[in-house]
Image (spheres, grey):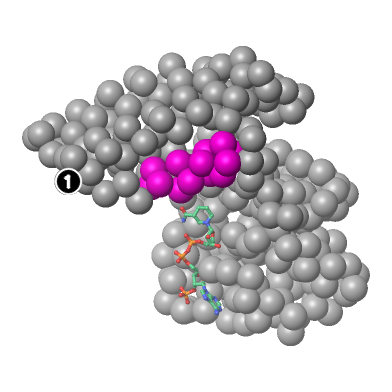
Amino acid sequence: MSSKQSVTVLGLGTMGSAITERLRETGHATTVWNRTAAKTEPHVKAGSTAAATVAAAVTAGDIVLVILLDHAAVHEHLEPVAVDLKDKVVVNLTTTTPNEARATAAWAAEHGITYLDGAILAVPEMIGASEALIFYSGDENAHALALPALESLGTARFEGGDPGIASLKDMALLSSMYLMLNGYLQAAAMMRTVGVPAADTAVDVTNWLSVILESLPHFGAIIDEGAYDPAAGQDVNFTRSALASLITASREQGVGADLLEPAKALLDELAATGRGSGDWPRIIELLTIK
Ligand code: FVH
């Protein structure tokens, strides 16, 4: 008999399935539940046990991993079984906002449930590899209890006692990813107007951004020190003018500038409020809603 923790997985979408498969590979007994029961079949064939109800599923495992679509689905299915969760460690890997994570942690605390919030910065194919980063936050004891199983899924990082921090970090990093990838789309749209394939622009953008990304620590230092003025690097006025050229060039090629214009508008606001000579990362001051 395995000495490894038994794990219940609620949710067999693409991520829940990848997690269940990895847990089996690493020797954990797994019990699975999914709203659409047919999705349990391949897992049963591969050695998992299917539970007909959420209550039966959570009763079976030492650890209950929740990987449903969203916050609403999590509460829809956990609230009716709160009593059954009391001697379990519940780890919620469903993507939720930081405040939703905090609300679930508060709900769990009210019901005496040992609860850990998690956020997966990976796609299903990465599960099990060290590149699969999974952030956890909230109850450190819950993290320690579940860690032997969680470590099999990827790199487990405990981010602190605020249950919302794991989600916040996940969402901050995803925000940076989408904004950066939109930058590539703008470049590809511009270059396609003269017949350059998007794949070629992907290579050029990768090379260019890898050089540019080296300046991020410098930006971080300027922001942390609030040392914008006088500008050590490119100032707001220069950057406004550069963005104005990019917007004009895009339009000349018949490409919209919808992605560039918001950044230009923020620079305009800095200039209009007497901050034109400061370093342009000062934009961050305008991102905080007061
Ligand atoms: N897949 C990914 O790349 C990302 C990576 C980062 C983290 N996300 C989050 O993981 C959660 C699950 O994502 P998923 O990829 O497994 O999603 P789906 O394949 O769409 O499966 C969704 C599962 O949720 C079940 N479900 C949906 N609504 C309900 C409900 N009201 N009650 C019970 N279960 C529900 C659905 O069941 P069914 O449709 O098969 O019956 C699937 O099991 C998610 O938070 C991602 O943001 C994945």
Q: In the rendered view, does 102 fall on the left or right side of 203? A: right
Instruction: Tell me which corner region of the image, top left, top right, bottom left or bottom right, holds residue 60.
Output: bottom right
In the rendered image, the vertical position of residue 23 relative to residue 83, given as above or below:
above
In the rendered image, the vertical position of residue 99 relative to residue 220, given as above or below:
below
* Prevailing SS of the magenta stretch: helix
Q: In the rendered view, does 44 fall on the left or right side of 251? A: right
Can see residue 25? no
| Rendered residue at 39%/43% (across/down) | 260
Instruction: Tell me which corner region of the image, top left, top right, bottom left or bottom right, holds residue 67.
Output: bottom right
Instruction: Tell me which corner region of the image, top left, top right, bottom left or bottom right, holds residue 221.
Output: top right
Q: In the rendered view, does 277 fall on the left or right side of 161? A: left
Residue 93 colored in magenta in the image? no
In the rendered image, the vertical position of residue 240 relative to residue 51, given as above or below:
above
Q: Nearer the viewer, residue 132 or 203?
A: 203
Report x, y in % for residue 187. Answer: 28, 35
Look at the numbered disc 1 and give the secondary structure of its residue.
loop
| Rendered residue at 52%/38% (across/down) | 267
| Rendered residue at 32%/34% (across/down) | 246
| Rendered residue at 44%/38% (across/down) | 180
Write down the residue under mark 1: 254
Label 1 within 8 A of ligand 1 by Cβ = no
Query: Which residue is situated farthest in the bottom direction here?
Result: 80
Residue 261 colored in magenta in the image? yes
| Amino acid at dot 1 | Gly
For the image, the number of numbered tags is 1
Report x, y in % for residue 6. Answer: 70, 57
Report x, y in % for residue 272. Answer: 58, 41
Q: Nearer the viewer, residue 168 or 69?
A: 168
The span picked out in magenta is 259-272
Q: In the rendered view, does 251 fall on the left or right side of 120? A: left
Q: Nearer the viewer, residue 167 or 260?
A: 260
